[in-house]
Amino acid sequence: MTLEVVSLPLGAYQTNCFVVTAQGSTDAVVIDPGDEAGRITDVLAERGLTLVAILVTHGHLDHTASAAALSWPWPSASRRSRST
């Protein structure tokens, strides 16, 4: 399986957000959806992807700011965070 990864530096801190999908799939995972939800949704729409999961590596705002905004258009997307 080949993964396609799009890196998006977002927000004032340019925190890396990743949109990950398996080649040939329309399912996508977003990792660390910091600021700028619109940029993330644009990438998903441009590639015809459906968000199935939102993953955050930790709870800082620059890694989580867009998680709620992404949940509205994709309410069935699973949300997971790393517990510390």
Image (cartoon, grey):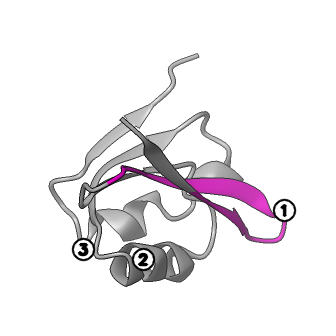
Describe the element under mark 3 as helix, strand or loop. Answer: loop
Q: Residue 53 placed where, x, y %?
A: 31, 47
Highlighted magenta segment, given as a residue range: 6-23
In the visual, does 77 lie left or right of 81? Answer: left
10 lies above or below 79: below
Mark 3 neighbour class, 10 Å CA radius: few under 14, some 14 to 19, many 20 or more: few
Dominant secondary structure of the residues highlighted in magenta in the image: strand
Look at mark 3 in the image and give the residue it sits on.
73
Answer whether labels 3 and 2 touch (C-beta < 8 Å).
Answer: yes
According to the picture, the residue beneath numbered tag 2 turns out to be 41
- Identify whether 58 is placed above or below 63: above
Foreground label between 1 and 2: 2
Give the CA separation, mark 1 to mark 3: 26 Å
Q: Residue at x 84, y 62 (%)?
A: 13
Query: Comparing marks 3 and 2, which lies closer to the viewer?
Result: 2
Secondary element at image label 2:
helix
- Residue placed under numbered mark 1 in the picture: 13
Seen from the viewer's position, the closer of residues 49 and 23 is 23
Q: Which one is earlier in the sequence, the residue at label 3 or at label 2?
A: 2
The amino acid type of the residue labelled 3 equals Pro
Question: Which residue is painted at 26% across and 70% down in the image?
Answer: 72
Which residue is rendered at x = 45% and y = 41% of the image? 55
The answer for how far apart the CA atoms under marks 1 and 2 are is 20 Å
Q: Quadrant of the C terminus?
A: top right
Q: Sequence-wise, which precedes: disc 1 or disc 2?
A: 1
Q: In the image, residue 65 lies at what x, y percent?
A: 57, 61
Q: Which quarter of the figure has residue 71?
A: bottom left
Which quadrant of the figure has residue 45? bottom left
Looking at the picture, how far across and down is residue 30, in whole percent? 45, 53
